[in-house]
Image: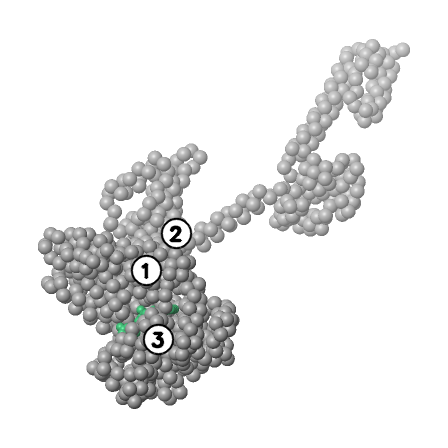
Amino acid sequence: MAHDDKHRAAIHYIRAKVDQLLGLMGTLPLRPEELDDETLIELDPIGIIGESFGQVITHLNETNHDLQLARNEIRAILDTLQAAVLVTDREDSLADCNRSALDWFFAGANIDSLRGRPLGELCGCWADMAAARAGAERRPQEVTLGGRHLQLIASVINDERGTPVKTVYLFFDISRLKAAEQGLQLYAQVFSHTHEGILITDRQQRIVDANDAFCRITGYALEELIGKTPRLLNSGLHDAGFYAAMWDSLRSQGHWGGEVRDRTRDGEIIPLLENINVVRNAAGEVTHYISVITDITSLKESQARLDFLAHHDVLTELPNRLLFQDRLEQAIERARREGSRLGLLFIDLDRFKNINDSLGHHVGDLLLVAVSQRLRDLLRRADSVARLGGDEFVVLSENLGDPDDACLLAHKIVTAIRQPFRIQDQELHIGCSIGITLFPEDGPDAGVLLRNADTAMYRAKESGRDGFARFSRELSEDVSGKLALENALRVAVREQRFTLHYQPIVTLGQGRVVAAEALIRWPDGPGATPDRFIPLAEETRLILPLGEWILRQALEQYHAWRAAGLALDYMSVNISAVQLAQPNFTERLLVLLDEVGIAGHHLQIELTENILMGDMALSQRVLGGLRGHGVRVAIDDFGTGYSSLSYLKQLPIDNLKVDRSFVRDIPGDPNDSAIAAAIIGLARTLGLEAIAEGIETEEQERFLTEIGCDKVQGYRYARALPAEQFRAFAEGFRILADRAA
Ligand code: C2E
Ligand code: MG
Ligand code: MG
């Protein structure tokens, strides 16, 4: 074969091989061994073809390898991406997606099961995706899907002719960003709405921000603060040492907290509670200071108020026991040094409990305030008054020239308290009993002086209230104490160690004993009178068994007298508020009357106005029930309590007992005379009977006769007597009257 022919054949062969090669491209990589080397060499003696063919093969091999690598790389990148990538084809069916997309949208399903399916039916947010594609140039779209906040970007891929072939959808998870954004918003809200003032300065302490509260507290507008330093607020009240310690703490601990007094824009000094924190960056350098302030003006005020309260009585704002004790001790010290004398007056209001029980604590409180005001008005500046609690007051009078000065002061107080009080449009009458001790005469220290004054006060109460008593040595011996009295009372009630005495009630016109008032006595008791132990019995509710015993005893006595020929109109028995408030009071009383065998109209119960007014509804019900059975009702101590007279018409009352205090000073005292006359007149107008209590003198008797009071009771005729003596007295008195007649 000629050389030219051979060469032509070779070229032909190569072309065929190249074609074959190109045809094989789909099944890469192609191995060079597949070509017949020998033939090649034979056909291509100079090796040019073989060489270029080898290069082609190698190149193809490398390209193929790189492509695969790039493809793997891209997939790896896509799969590790914290974003979902979805690729759709021309028909909007899923062409491909990454792992995040599988997880987020398709619950981790396999891509092969999804590929080729229309995205419209696969994806809940297809509408958003379509919108994103339509506005591909515009801002990224935000989508929420399964609790995730996603940002969606769509990008369309065109072929070489510009026809869209694929769309790539990218979803970025911006949930954390969103949360952070909300967090920041929250902080901003806290910053602007908190009650604490917040101030932020840079490292040079130039103010960069302050919240509304800070501006409100300091009075500065934000613009006035920005750029300044907190020295703007300096009050000048803290020394250099204070600020040095503050900076010390800021440097060493990054924090300072304490109380400061700053000056507001108006120049006012305000107390603040301040906390300063140092803010550092990652490198540990100071970037800011944050100061949080709280206005503690009101706290300071309440502290002062608390301090005041610890030493004062809330109601009357008088010094309390604690402060008084302190003052007394100091006064004693001074008196000891100067050799002077001081007087202590222990004041207890009479029948205050009645007011409280009947008109309510509110009225009681107002009365206490009024009493304390009256005491204040009465005293010299040098004297001090305190409230020890309840209705107990105490007055300290320093530099007394004469021991009698204390008595003069006591007299002034008793007289002042006796004047009526006007409380809530009602006129209230109250008295007080005062016990007096002197230093150095009656005790070496505050404790003994107070205790002895208390004892003397009880003496004043026992001798008829509304007066005063000086302490004496003998008195100190009967400091039985309330507790001892209560214990003794308990035993006495259990063992029925009481007796009843009876005070005659007489008619002046007929000169006859018409009735008896039963008054309790405690023969072997600790010397206490009913005025002292009855309130205690009420307080401890021992009055319930005691009261029942009294009623039965009195009714049986009345029955016995009757049987013996002493026919009184009725027996009068004192009843306490506690008894009246018992739910079955009426029933028990009626049963008792029945048991003893006495008609209702032979019993009179004595109640004070305050008891009756305490609970009008109750009074009406109980008294109404009793009236139905003929039981008589008398108002005891009339004129000392509630002065609204309207209740006289509302309640079934038979008898007014004019209080002893109005009788005591008649006819000398024109006031008392007028009151007594008015009460008698009132009783007559209302068709009620009136009894004047506590007649001791002939003048009193004459005056009462003149103003038309016929029934009387008092020492002038007889004290309360034991049953036997009463009977003798009553019969004798009748004889006396008969003789007079
Ligand atoms: P009251 O019911 O107003 O009794 C009148 C008090 O005045 C009696 O004192 C009586 O002894 C006294 N008195 C009578 N006439 C005169 C007088 O001419 N001059 C003076 N200075 N006083 C006179 P008593 O017995 O110490 O009783 C005091 C209060 O104790 C009574 O006041 C009454 O509120 C209460 N009380 C006495 N006995 C009982 C009782 O059995 N039950 C209840 N619940 N209270 C009683
Ligand atoms: Mg009475
Ligand atoms: Mg009375």
CB contact under 8 Å: marks 2 and 1: no
Q: Taking 286 as reference, is 374 left or right?
A: left
User: Circle 2 sits on which residue?
Assistant: 197
Foreground mark, 1 or 3, reads 3
Q: Is residue 445 at all visible to an observer of this figure?
A: yes
Vertical order, 1 against 614 (above or below): above
Q: Quadrant of residue 378?
A: bottom left
Quadrant into which the N terminus falls = top right
Residue 727 - label:
3
Foreground: 137 or 736? 736
Query: Disc 2 to disc 1, how far (Cα)?
Result: 73 Å
Q: Residue at x 41, y 55 (%)?
A: 212
Left or right position of 61 against 16: left
Return the x and y of residue 2 as percentages of the image width and height.
Answer: 88, 11
- Earlier sequence position, callout 2 versus callout 1: 2
The amino acid pointed to by label 2 is Gly
Closest to the observer, 308 or 714: 714
Residue 590's tag is none
Of the pair 244 and 693, the residue shown nearer to us: 693
Label 3 CB less than 8 angstroms from ligand 1? no
Quadrant position of residue 4? top right
The span from disc 3 to disc 2 (Cα, nearest Å) is: 87 Å
Report the residue marked by disc 1.
Answer: 524
